[in-house]
Image: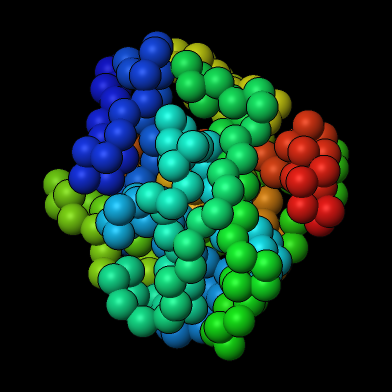
Amino acid sequence: MQSIFLVPLIFSLFWISGKAAVKRRPDGRIVNGREAREGEFPYQLSLRRLTVHICGASVLDGSWAITAAHCVDGHERQPHEFTLRLGSVKRSSGGSIMTVRTIYKHPSYDTTDMNFDVALLRTQAGALTLDPNVAPIKLPEAGEAIQENISAIVSGWGHMSSTEPMLSSVLKYTTVMTVNQQKCQNDLSFHGGVSEAMFCAAARNTDACQGDSGGPLTVQGRLIGIVSWGVGCADPYYPGVYTRLSHPSIRRWVRLLTKL
């Protein structure tokens, strides 16, 4: 069985601590993906810290974006360090740059096992939908089931292969299939398994670490998951793990803060 070590998410900006350091690594790659066209993923954001891309994120409405908690963990009191690039498929140019004003991590987020790995980012009111190339994405309802073997799309600017640790300059995407929850649990049992706030998705010949951390997993125009963690990279034995946005605790928390 393959061992796993925590690696820096992007450019050594931060580390996840605790027992996750030997079991779980933040996801950060799309392998064998296709390049997105301008406007194809209008909800996709690049989350940047100190001007450097670190994670993906998604537009919920004009004032709110959503990402993974591990992307901002330890920096909640420094929202001024974070910006969002929106309205461009290019990681380092085009579109608009918006400042993050407030960061909220899910109150049950656990750095040791990455449970409830979700965070909300608040910007100036209406700022995220001023760009004509940007549009929000809808969330699932609380408790909504994720059927197995459903085609889903994940997108991001992550590494393009396990041997080429370079970020993609252009947004990439790939198609994965949702995995039966018991199979997800069995496949990852050696690495702590998964909680009800997580689910798996995978596909043959594409990376097991699908997409940038914090980036979107969508089904028919709805945001069902956030890229969270994985084991290895492009390993056919391990699916990628996503935060389940329909989990009642997560959905209630998002609605409480955003009214969405």
Q: Would you say 122 lies left or right of 33 here? A: right
Quadrant that contains the C terminus: bottom right
Instruction: Say whether residue 76 is visible.
Output: yes
217 lies left or right of 182: left
Q: Residue at x 26, y 64 (%)?
A: 168
Whether residue 65 appears in this view of the structure is: no
In the rendered view, tell whether residue 211 sits above or below residue 26: below
Q: Nearer the viewer, residue 140 or 194?
A: 140
Q: How many marks?
A: 0
- Residue 173, given in percent of the width and then of the height, sits at 44, 65
- Residue closer to the observer: 207 or 98: 98
Q: Residue at the location (52% across, 42% down)?
A: 68
| x then y, percent, for residue 217 | 57, 54
Q: What residue is drawn where x is 51% and y is 56%?
A: 100
Q: Residue at x 35, y 46 (%)?
A: 28
Height in image: 255 above or below 74?
below
Residue 218 point in image, percent of width and height? 62, 59
Front-lying residue, 160 or 43: 43
The image shows residue 220 at horizontal and vertical percentages of 70, 66
- Dividing the image into 4 quarters, which one contains the N terminus? top left
In the displayed structure, 62 sits above or below 235; it is below
Quarter residue 199 falls in: top right
Which colour style is shown?
rainbow
